[in-house]
Image (tube, coloured by chain):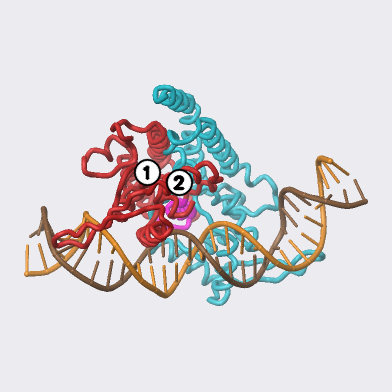
Chain colours: A cyan, B red, C brown, D orange
Amino acid sequence: MDVRTLCLGALMGGEATGYEIRKMFEDGTFSHFQIASLGSIYPALTKLTQDGLVTFVEHEQENRPDKKIYQLTSEGRRTFLRTLLQTRPAEDRYRSDILFMLTFAEEMPIELTEALIDEFAARHELMSQQIDPENTDKPAHQKSNARDENGELRPGCCFVAGLGQAMRNATLKFIRENKQGLLDELKARKTNKS
Amino acid sequence: MDVRTLCLGALMGGEATGYEIRKMFEDGTFSHFQIASLGSIYPALTKLTQDGLVTFVEHEQENRPDKKIYQLTSEGRRTFLRTLLQTRPAEDRYRSDILFMLTFAEEMPIELTEALIDEFAARHELMSQQIDPENTDKPAHQKSNARDENGELRPGCCFVAGLGQAMRNATLKFIRENKQGLLDELKARKTNKS
DNA sequence: TTCGATATATATCGGATTGATATAGTCGTT
DNA sequence: AACGACTATATCAATCCGATATATATCGAA
């Protein structure tokens, strides 16, 4: 799925600026299973405008850079829905530098191992809070794809958010239960060697 | 973490060809938390050779393309360990087209939603089998980073594999428990609308 | 009060990475 | 005997990330 398609999807929830779209991927509805950087979002929106799939209105703001509020055209909407039906989804991919590094726990000082595990837990804890669709919707002005026109939580979003939550919880539970065991094992090995 | 560093890490477990390194990321020890494609591995190995961090022996094979068996140099080993100590690990990122698509479950036919969920479950089931370090080590000829020189499972690998396993299990459990609920909810909404 | 950090907002670009393709032979299956 | 799957390396266009630039506002801390 390229960034153009992701942008169309983000705009299915209503109008938004490029900056707001990035926030959906960084903090918001999509944050725990998709990513897109500003460096790909802005060119994507330009291309989509050229192709007639989105339009934008430029809002001049006092003492702030101009704001371009993007919106799906009816063709953009149709294109996105067609893409949903036709696309074979790519393989899921999870990428974690920390887990890669922890693989080599034996080769590093125990304090570093512990610090890496703690950082891993902290990051996932943070993510866990962001996932909750109730939470991310709190500020009324913020855009969110989690609710439909009637303000009801969309079932697809609920399901996906719940899944993310379950994954995080399992991750944090595993760390709570196994961190000390790993550290002990590493200590035992070090004293054995010397 | 760039592919060069990942390759050094892969070679910490012993010598390997580029093809075998890719397998570690596709099927093997690293498969559930890192990825690297052949298109990035081969150039990385070339660069590492130029920089003196790895060396290779070319094995001419009968009726097969030549094999380049790569190995860490002592400087390569030192460089990798230094990198472990110095690198600030990048944020974890999980990317799933299927979950993104499921977010829009309301906009697609229920059969597609169900098919996507089933495919998601099937893929994670497969992954779950690959993670088990006991399994991936079965064929004696296959390279694996999960064991040390003495053939013992390395504690870091165990920990990371266990974490992966816990995540998969939580994912699959959530789907078992919530799939039908989502489908029912979607059906109810469709009949309400019409 | 002034400094630094954070937030809003768009734009650009070098460098890294993916995914597809080319080449080439073996092996198992239908 | 034809087809796909596996072993094995190599290349490259298209894409994407991450950093940087530009400009201003706000808010807390020193």
In this orientation, which residue lies closer to the viewer: B16 or B102?
Answer: B16
Q: Position of residue A163 (x, y in %)?
A: 47, 41
Which residue occupies 61% across, 60% down?
Answer: A14
Q: Which residue is mark 2?
A: B80
Which residue occupies 40% across, 40% down?
Answer: B175
* Left or right: A21 in relation to B177: right
Q: Mark 2 to mark 1: distance in Å?
A: 9 Å
In this orientation, which residue lies closer to the viewer: B22 or A1?
Answer: B22
* Left or right: D20 in relation to A124: right
Q: Position of residue B58 (x, y in %)?
A: 25, 58
Residue B47 position by quadrant: bottom left
Q: Is residue B96 magenta?
A: yes
Secondary structure mostly taken by the magenta-highlighted segment of the chain: helix
Q: Residues within 10 Å of mark 1 (few under 14, many from 20)?
A: some
> Judging from the image, what secondary structure is the residue with disc 1 in?
loop
Residue B191 visible in image: no
Which residue occupies 40% across, 49% down?
Answer: B8
Q: Residues within 10 Å of mark 2 (few under 14, many from 20)?
A: many
A164 in relation to A142, above or below: above
Q: Which residue is mark 1?
A: B12
Dot 1: chain letter: B
Q: Position of residue A140 (x, y in %)?
A: 70, 49
